[in-house]
Amino acid sequence: MPNYVVRCGIMRTLHVMQGRQEYIRGMRVIARTPRGLEAGEIVCEADQRVLDQMDNPPGGTLQRPMTEEDENELAHLTAHSVAEADICFRAMRELELPMDLVDIERVFGGERVVVYYLSENRVDFRELVKRLSNELQTRIEMRQIGVRDEAKLLADYGDCGKPVCCNTHLMKMPPVSMKMAKMQKATLDPNKISGRCGRLKCCLRYEYDVYEEHQRSLPRIGADIVTSNGRGRVLGQEVLSRQLLVQMEDNRRVMVHADDILSVMRREKTRERTKQASEEE
């Protein structure tokens, strides 16, 4: 039987599971994962091309397509999640724990309740777990997350008008640096390049490899080059269009395409020629 990629839980974790029958994309299913019985959604068939793009995905087994009874049970759990979150919030405040509740998730089979929280430091939550176990009558799992995971749980749409990437297609959140924004000539205004999580937008990472590849093929800023219109020095780069701002020998500043460069002069040779010219004078 074929394997399938299945998205489960409010963290939208991607699993690879074997099915006992054929499933189609978008089908709602009940699956057994390491956390217990969960509701999930079929993403695609897990052929080798798909598996090569995934990094050790968790496993599981597909139990059945979701029935009407399953849908009713899922709606019942969702309806009670607000009350359970209130219980958890009150317990945190009464115990004066330095943590912020983000969300809770009751696994479909009832095996556990997962509490997602934010905290700058480690928290001794043993008393909280005991209290919640007694009140909710199930196993409690505490999971500390970061602000990017918080956005994955709570955010809806980004500045682009589309659903946030972390809650749709991203399987893992790649590191993003200010260097990527600078290379792409993006505005450095934090309000415009920050996502719903307050960190640099994940989309700054998408095209960075292409920019980096193009930049390697261009002469560095400060390099001396020879073009069909004469010699000049590179003052700036337009990486994506592969154009250079060049100051010519007559001090004119012109835009030159990378394909119009005849040669790049080594800095050592340039210095030698300058030194020889000064000695002759």
Image (tube, grey):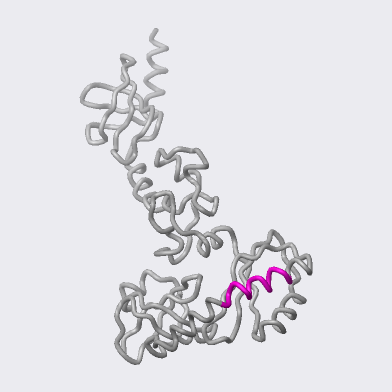
Q: Report the residue at 22% width, 22% height from top.
A: 229
Relative to 104, 268 lies left or right:
left
- The spot of residue 266 in percent (x, y) is 36, 31
Q: Of helix, strand and loop, which mostly describes the magenta segment? A: helix
User: Does 70 appear above or below 237?
Assistant: below
Residue at the left extreme, as displayed: 228
Q: In the image shown, does 109 or 6 lie closer to the viewer?
A: 109
Tell me which segment is drawn in magenta. 80-91
Which image quadrant for residue 269? top left
Q: Position of residue 5 (x, y in %)?
A: 38, 77
Q: Quadrant of residue 59?
A: bottom left
Is 76 part of what is drawn in magenta?
no
Residue in the image at 52% along x and 59% along y: 151
Count of numbered marks: 0
For residue 84: magenta? Answer: yes
Q: Is residue 103 above or below residue 187?
A: below
Q: Position of residue 170 (x, y in %)?
A: 42, 63
Above or below for 99 versus 262? below
Please identify the quadrant where the C terminus is shown.
top left
Residue 240: horizontal and vertical position, in percent? 31, 41
Nearer to us in this view, 188 or 101: 101
